[in-house]
Amino acid sequence: MRSARPVGLLLSAAVALWAYGMTTWQPLTEPLGPWSERLPGNNAYWARDLRFMAIMAVPLGLVLAGRGRVRWGGPAVVLGGCWIAADVAIDRADPIGVGATVLLAVTGCGVLGVVAALLLWWERATPPARDSDTQSTGERGTQSAANRRVLTGAACVAGVLTLVAAAMESPTDREPELNQGALATAALLVALAVGAALAAAPARTRARVGLAVGLTVVALLGVGLVRATAPGARLLPEVALGAVLLTGVTLVAWDWPGGRPIWWHHALAALIALVGPLVFLVATAIPMMIMMPIGATFTALAGNSPIHAADSDLLVSLVGLLSGLGMAVLLARPSVEDRRQLR
């Protein structure tokens, strides 16, 4: 997909959303005073999770811009890890105000621009290796099988993170800023999921583009439905959103031998998309709450008040990332040969 590079770089500019979350939403989540009776509860630091998902969108956008090539994906992951570390340090400094927002956004875009320029220079200076992993798909295209798997995996990660962002809650569930942040972050991730899926397709046909546009519209409506549902009753619309979005990813990205999808393959993918995200999210969250206090560690490093002992400091953005990688293992199989290996 020729537009993958500009679209990926444009979506990587999620750094502006991250900057706004740091200086505007984060101060709203920090309690006034260290008294034990005022310690925050479950999901208190929702702004941190929205920021972390915006940070995760940056390497996903770079993977899309690099069309799934390893020379883009590796540095993108390293950049994401460094950005998380920088986020913790900046959070500890408690920036606030329009000036801080502009400064962080400009600095972040500058860092992203330098990294993208270096990757473009590296790509042009190094001749591409001959790809022996290209497979016949019955459709005219130039993407290698390995790159297509990476792009489809990125789409799966973005899809699961969309569910996490759309269902984000807080102890009071009354903050209008939470709805704004959840909608903006989820919309960004929907665009990344569909864009990566379309880039993974062996050919950008009119049918696939139309399907991608329809999937984007339906997924955005699903995000709005999840946010419109009362907290505590969002499970069913969240599961439905995940099933539609991830099944749509397979329809857009997977091979269509003879110009038609293999429908029973997508029916199986739909079943996995219906059950898989919830299973992975629960299976990841429970051990993290019981054995690995990662959220509490980040809270302490950022100098914020600990969560009340009766509640848990769960880093739901990390849960979503790991669950998305789990779904990628199952669904990032765009070619028919990839799926035959499961038999």
Image (cartoon, rainbow, N blue to C red):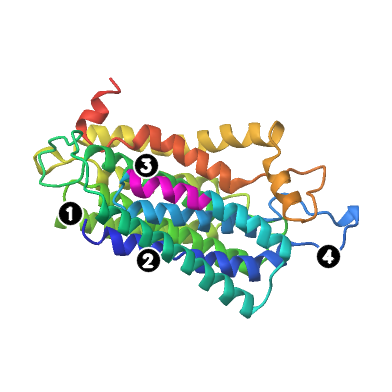
Query: On the image, numbered disc 3 is attached to which residue?
Result: 153
Looking at the image, is mark 2 or mark 1 earlier in the sequence?
A: 2
Q: Position of residue 153 (x, y in %)?
A: 37, 42
Q: Quadrant of the N terminus?
A: bottom left
Q: Is residue 237 above or below residue 264?
A: below
Looking at the image, is mark 3 or mark 2 earlier in the sequence?
A: 2
Query: On the image, numbered disc 2 is attached to which residue?
Result: 10
- Find the distance from the CA under tag 4 to the CA under tag 2: 37 Å
Which marked residue is nearer to the observer: mark 3 or mark 2?
Answer: 2
For this rendering, which residue is in front, 260 or 337?
337
Looking at the image, is mark 3 or mark 4 earlier in the sequence?
A: 4
Amino acid type at mark 3: Gly
Which marked residue is nearer to the observer: mark 4 or mark 2?
Answer: 2
- Find the distance from the CA under tag 1 to the CA under tag 4: 53 Å
Q: Quadrant of residue 217?
A: bottom left
Q: Residue at x 58, y 65 (%)?
A: 179
Amino acid type at mark 1: Arg
Q: Residue at x 51, y 66 (%)?
A: 108
For this rendering, which residue is in front, 258 or 25?
25
Question: In the displayed structure, does residue 290 sit left or right of residue 197?
Answer: right
- Mark 2: which secondary structure? helix
Q: Residue at x 15, y 47 (%)?
A: 142
Amino acid type at mark 4: Leu
- Mark 4: which secondary structure? loop
